Amino acid sequence: MSGLRTQAARTSPIADETMQFGSSSDDQVRAQRFRDAALPYLDDVYTLARYLLRDASDAEDAVQECYLRALKHFDSYRGPAMKPWLFAILRNVCRAEFARRTHSSITPADELPETAEQTTPLWSEAQETPETEVLRHRDASAIQRMIAALAEPFKETFVLREIQNLSYREIAEAVGAPVGTVMSRLARARAMLRTAWLAEEEQPK
């Protein structure tokens, strides 16, 4: 996506924090293990933060806090996979701290209107979908605008699936919801996006 800083530019402050964690050789080994396990997903975590918070500075702060919390609890980490675990921590950071600061609210899924198309579950789907085709061909700003306009929690579900390529089970672990709920949210997110870009296509050029 355009406008995102490189991983190297964001790695330094996080690496500095982990280097300062404890002075014993055990602490240094632990910090190195954490960097090796978690830093490869730094850009993915930042991308999700940008979609959730819509502000580069807030996203960077959230990523920093996410990694500090992850380091603090790294000794007790036994799974799921590292990437969904980091996403789960980031969600808590964004919702508990930054959502309040920006006075944003999250509309519960069961309070949003449904249509027959939106409620059709995608229990079995092809690898290629119309939505992934659009993601490849539309410019980054148009993609970001349409996804950012999605209501929560459909936005994060779509980003985790279509942009971060997490499995349904990994998304369920990250957001703390049943797999069936994840599938339903993804189906509704796709329907909302489909409506948005069809409406955009119909506008006079």
Image (spheres, rainbow, N blue to C red):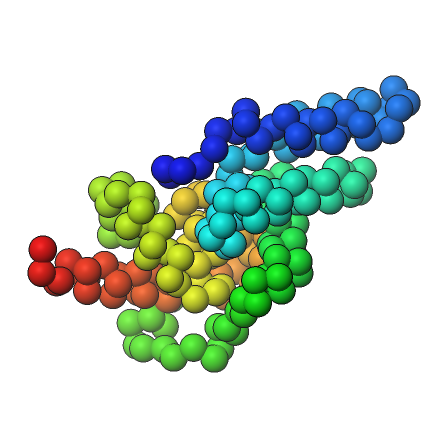
Q: Which is nearer the eye, 18 or 125?
A: 18
Q: Is residue 97 visible?
A: yes
Image coordinates of residue 62 in percent, x first then y, are 62, 47
Horizontally, residue 9 falls left or right of residue 144, namely right
Residue 204 higher or lower than 39, as above or below: below
Q: Residue at x 55, y 45 (%)?
A: 57
Residue 11 is drawn in which quadrant? top right
Residue 41 is drawn in which quadrant? top right
Horizontally, residue 159 falls left or right of residue 23, namely left
Q: Quadrant of the N terminus?
A: top left
**Farthest residue, direction left:** 204
Q: Which is nearer the eye, 133 or 1?
A: 1
Q: Is residue 176 visible?
A: no
Image coordinates of residue 27 in percent, x first then y, are 85, 26
Q: Residue at x 50, y 73 (%)?
A: 107
Q: Which is nearer the eye, 48 or 34?
A: 48
Q: Quadrant of the C terminus?
A: bottom left
Image coordinates of residue 119 in percent, x first then y, are 36, 72
Q: Residue at x 57, y 67 (%)?
A: 103
Image coordinates of residue 154 in percent, x first then y, are 44, 62
Horizontally, residue 48 falls left or right of residue 138, namely right
Q: Which is nearer the eye, 61 or 95?
A: 61
Q: Residue at x 87, y 29 (%)?
A: 22
